[in-house]
Amino acid sequence: MHMRMKFLLYRGRRLMLLLVLFTALAHNSKASSHREAPLISNDPLADNTDVYAFRDPNDTSKINLIADYIPFELPEGGPNYYSFGENIRYEIHIKNKTTTTGDDITYRFTFTRVNQDSTTFFNIRLGKQNIKTTYTCERSIDGGKTFVAIVTNGVVPPNNIGPRSIDSAVGLNTTYDALVNSSIATTATGEKVFCGPRDDPFFVDLAGAFDVGNFRPMGNKTNPTKDGLARYNVHTIAIQVPISMLQKDGLTTSAATSILDPNFVIGVWASASREQIKTIDSTTGKYGYTGKWVQVSRLGMPLDNEVITPVGYKDKWNAANPANDAANFGAYLENPELALYMDASQFGGAVPSLSALRIQTKSLGSYDFRNGKQGLFPLKGSAAVAGTALDDKNFGTILLPNDHSPRAVDLLPIFYTGVPNLAPYQLATGKPKGNPLAAGKPFVNNFLPTLGDMLRLNMAVPVTPRNSPQFSSEGLLAAAVTGLTDSTLISHGTKLEFIPNMDGFPNGRRLEDDVTTIELQAVSGVALAAIGLWYDDYSLDTSSTPVTKQLNNVLLFTSGPTHNDTTLRTTFPYEQTPWRGFDYTIQARF
């Protein structure tokens, strides 16, 4: 008995060691902006990967809201292929009023899975599917108090396994596109809804980013930049909604007072929630869930929790409501860690790949925006800021909170309030030389001051056609550059007029937008430069153009891949057909 006990203890320790090793390998096998927090990396079915919100390029009376889940889906990942999880509430949240607390509109999705033929180990065989998934979509327009089903028994297309599973009589005897088209639901209330596998449209050099900022912006022949998400799939929830259903008063854009009408701004974020208690049946091995629903993942602005929030607070961020973001996490935007690697007096020399990005230390000879410095705080309470957004009577207490939070003036509004069409947040075009606080050329207004992380979109801004030669993955930054350099626009001074890509990130987010590059450029102070707080090598006395060498370095910077590894669909749901497992090769990612 003694020997048997020793054996059992040895075997138990060995099994425990193997379990620990397996768990460690599983947790560390991939690292990405998708697996942004320690706890959610253990629960991929509930993991938000990206959120998109953009005005439809084919029908400009509609808005597309897209939330992606389940990172790093290998197309050949059978026999139990990836799918939306049961016992999870997937939600897309919309804020359109400042007079209410919490959501104004919520779309909730819950999924059910069945095995149609439990006698086979195949996922699809002879017209039947295992893990066949359906969904219910409910909508709330009263702050989440009540929900009404607008889609019941909605169809989720299967994974794109291969030609025998999908196209042949051995499988479903159809085409994958036909499966997708037939699964798009049109509701009685006017939305189009799609849930199912798609190509992951996000693109980023993950290996470089998380090797202590070792981006490969220009690439090289021996070790070129890589899209770490190339040829992976995700599970997508896409909703196409009439603008009048999202606008707070039920208006269409024909009623907008301008292309920057503040009454057409919405904030969008997505989440996943689970019940608190999970149990495992010792006989069947099946899971059970009970208790209060708890949010385990959320996403609004891309890369906020991933690269702005320190690792010790990422789980807290995922569980928090955006209404509490300013108090809980605002300090990380006011003095972001990333800025230390763009500051030669700190750690800028230790991250060569970011050498093109340097923050203003003496903009216009005076203003220092490095971490812990004063930024524009010396102007607080002065006559110079009277009537501007920096006036305490407006938003100065938020934007100029103290003498050591310089980025509260630019990064915090980009992430937590949106940017108002109010001085100084207008292009330097039309401003007197050296006076960034003057009125300039309007180019953005997605101001919704909830002080929380949301993807903000002004729905009145016209669409930039995808086939336009001026369409740019640089989004709103490209619009700013055009507004600062186009001679025709310059001649029009402070006149409000449409500039291509005003509908791009961070005014919403299009599938094509290179958000990683844009956000790194923003941390480097490019938004400050756009409104007239130029880089250090600009001289009021001698410079004829603000596009100095330093600004040009920032504008030419890329974080690596600048577009998705495949095309996008030209119609809803816009994300491309998921990669087919049978044809998939990992080598094609590079």
Image: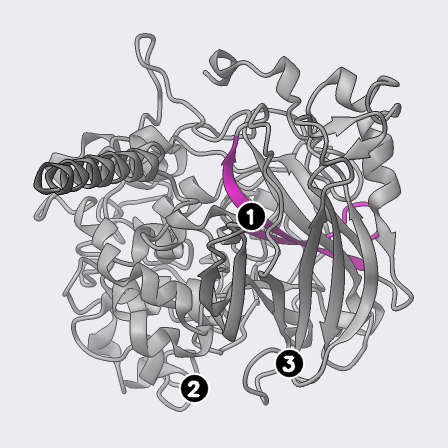
Mark carried by residue 394: 2
Q: Secondary structure at mark 1?
A: strand
Of mark 1 and mark 2, the one earlier in the sequence is 1
> Is 322 rendered above or below residue 426?
below
Q: CA distance from mark 1 to mark 2?
A: 38 Å
The picture places residue 379, in percent across and down from the top left corner, at 25, 78
Q: Secondary structure at mark 2?
A: loop
Q: Quadrant of residue 126?
A: top right
Residue 11 in view here: yes
- Left/right of residue 302 with respect to residue 563 in the rendered view: left
Horizontal side of residue 467 vs 470, given as left or right: right
Q: Is 564 on the left-hand or right-hand side of 6?
A: right
Residue 429 falls left or right of residue 319: right
Q: Which sits in the foreground, 422 or 302? A: 302
Tell me the quadrant of the picture where the C terminus can be found. top left
Give, as a single range, the part of the protein colored magenta.
49-73
For disc 3, the marked residue is 144
| Residue with the mark numbered 1 | 69
Task: Report if residue 70 lies within the magenta region.
Answer: yes
Structural distance between the alpha carbons of marks 3 and 2? 31 Å
Measure how far apart labels 3 and 1 are at the Cα level.
22 Å
Q: Amino acid at mark 3?
A: Gly
